[in-house]
Image (cartoon, rainbow, N blue to C red):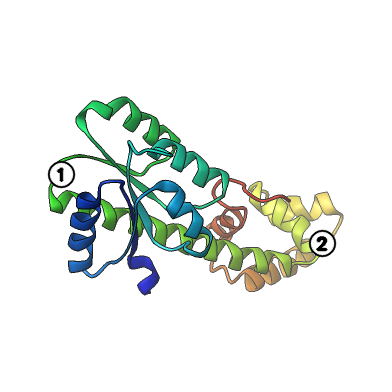
Amino acid sequence: MTGHKVVHVIDDDAAVRDAVGLLLSTEGYKVHAYPSAPAFLKTAPAQREGCVVTDVRMPEMNGIELIAKMREDKLSMPVIVLTAHADVPLAVEAMKLGAVDLLEKPFEDEALLAAVDAALERRSAEETRSRESLVFKNRLASLTRRENEILAGLLKGLSNKVIAHDLGISIRTAEVHRANIMAKMRAGNLAELVKMALAANGPSGTDSE
């Protein structure tokens, strides 16, 4: 699980990098520090773990451009933005682009630790969800064409009787198929089955089905 304790700190101010790095290291985080956004992006493909703490105003590439570039490159690490008081409009822009948190300098140590904790927690929950989604997808893939037709009926809230009538099969056959679906999906009841079927399609329909 150590991968989830990784934090990438990006700031062109060496004093801030050192201070933030020291604070996080003391708390047991593994810290990678970078003097600029391009320096981070150069190693990013190999560093897909953890979260990012970045200053919003930097030469070469600012925090906003970094978040936009990460989205473009499909780097899904949560980003916490550090901002000076004068940079509030930039910070708002960062939040719109998907930054998960915003801290104004000078910030309390506790505030940074809480933000990093929450970002990593969120990352971990997302990974768990996508793993579950894959498991349910694989179970769905094991259903036969007929079972899929019956599942479609069940998801519409139709009874075995109506499904059987629509498909031109006996109620008994529909019940057998339904039991097979529940067994293959490992669902204890209809509510669980519905949740699994929805989860298999991913939270944002990112599938290219």
Question: Residue drawn 45% across and 42% down?
Answer: 67
Q: Is residue 200 left or right of residue 11?
A: right
Question: Residue drawn 39% across and 70% down?
Answer: 3
Question: Residue drawn 53% across and 69% down?
Answer: 188
Front-lying residue, 132 or 100: 100
Q: Which residue is mark 1?
A: 107
Q: Of tags 1 and 2, which is closer to the observer?
A: 1
Q: Is residue 75 left or right of residue 180?
A: left
Q: Which mark is residue 145?
A: 2
Front-lying residue, 209 or 57: 57
Picture quadrant where residue 95 is located = top left
- Element on which disc 1 rests: loop
Q: How many marks?
A: 2
Residue type (three-letter) at the residue carrying disc 1? Phe
Q: Residues within 10 Å of mark 1 (few under 14, many from 20)?
A: few
At which x and y percent is residue 191? 53, 57
Q: Is residue 44 left or right of residue 160?
A: left
At which x and y percent is residue 32? 34, 62
Q: Residues within 10 Å of mark 2 (few under 14, many from 20)?
A: few
Question: Residue drawn 43% across and 54% down?
Answer: 40
At which x and y percent is residue 112? 21, 51
Work out whether 36 lies above or below 61: below
